[in-house]
Amino acid sequence: MRNKFTKSWALGALVVLFATVALVSPAVANTPGLPIQGTDIATKWDALYNFLVALSVFFFVLVVGAMLFFVFKYRAKPGVKTKYIADHHLLEGVWTFVPFVLLMVIFVWGYALYNKMVTAPSNAMEIQVTGKQWLWQFQYDDGRTTIGEIYVPVNQPVRLKMSSTDVLHSFFIPNFRVKQDVVPGMYSSVWFEATVTGQHQVFCTEYCGGNHSGMLAKLIVLSPEDWENWKRGKKLLASNEPEKITTTSAATERAQAPLLTLVEQGKAHFNSKGCVACHSPDGSAKGNLGPALKGIYGAQVELISGSKVMVDENYLRESIENPVAKIVKGYNPVMPTFKGQVSELEMNALIAFIKSLK
Ligand SMILES: [Cu+2]
């Protein structure tokens, strides 16, 4: 009896295995319907995804196949009574150990990939992204702004520093397999290195009101030559004709009307908003009332509470919008809040300026 049971079981398993291999192989090759792979991350992400699909198919076939097999093989027959099976240590060991190994593989693989996706290389180029109902606006280091279109060079890591003027949005580039929430009152970031030139669709992927589905942008990846041309081109506020941007006439226009860089814009705001009254203009010496801002980005600052904080973009932002939240040791809480008086674009410039004080 026991022998017969083992033999049928083995036979059934073999049939299921063959069926699965036949089914799984196309899934391993590539899950149909995924968008093109515009980054190296996208290729790696797809490999993990395809593995998960294949694994799911395999176990679906195995479990349902075995179930169907047993239903027919051991269906109730008059006069036949199944032996009472108490336990089977080998079987229990296998069904514990195999899932454990598989889950660990998925965990380590997924974690390594996630780490790569969230850690921008230190040489990444930075672009400021502002989401608002219902458009995306971009600021580049050299002072240009674009709406609804973001231009990046190919094969160059790009880090987007993002915030929102109103509600939660989320920046999603399906071809690159990256997305990140864009939150009012703080900065979040996402990075990518585009490997495919041309246009890629950007979506807002967090429901943000009536025209959420219209909150789109085009990400235009330029070859090194095109990128140089575009940099020399004219200011591209809300241009809808990317194919025209590389013409020489645009380049001349740019030369005639040079823009203030983001840092220069920040310096201008620093003066016009009155920061300069309390913080010295070049940030080096101590001003009248406020601490020196030179070199604070990336450094540790001691607070009145005795604790220390790392100065990053979000700390700078909080210091400007809500100065009393963290008071610097040795100073009085006399800095007024600038919440509502500094626009999102001005905030990006101010922070770029403070970061540049080295
Ligand atoms: Cu949105």
Image (cartoon, rainbow, N blue to C red):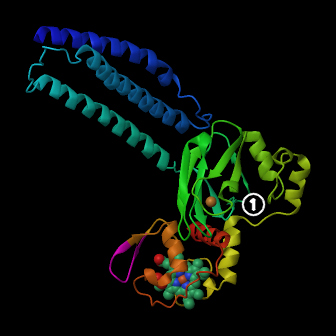
Residue 29: within the magenta? no
Dividing the picture into quadrants, the one containing residue 56 is top left
Determine whether 276 is above or below 219 in the image: below
Q: Residue at x 75, y 58 (%)?
A: 146
Horizontal and vertical percent for residue 348?
A: 62, 68
Task: Give left or right: position of 91 versus 191.
Answer: left
Quadrant location of residue 287?
A: bottom right
Q: For the point 61% across and 77% down, which residue is it? A: 282
Q: Which residue is labeled 1 in the image?
A: 144
- In this view, the residue in front, 198 or 358, is 198
* Residue in the image at 39% along x and 18% along y: 20
Horizontally, residue 296 falls left or right of residue 57, namely right
x, y percentage for residue 41?
53, 38
- Which three-letter amino acid code belongs to the residue tagged 1? Arg
Residue 112, given in percent of the width and then of the height, sits at: 40, 40
Q: How many marks?
A: 1
Give the magenta part as a residue range.
300-308
Q: Residue furthest right?
A: 249
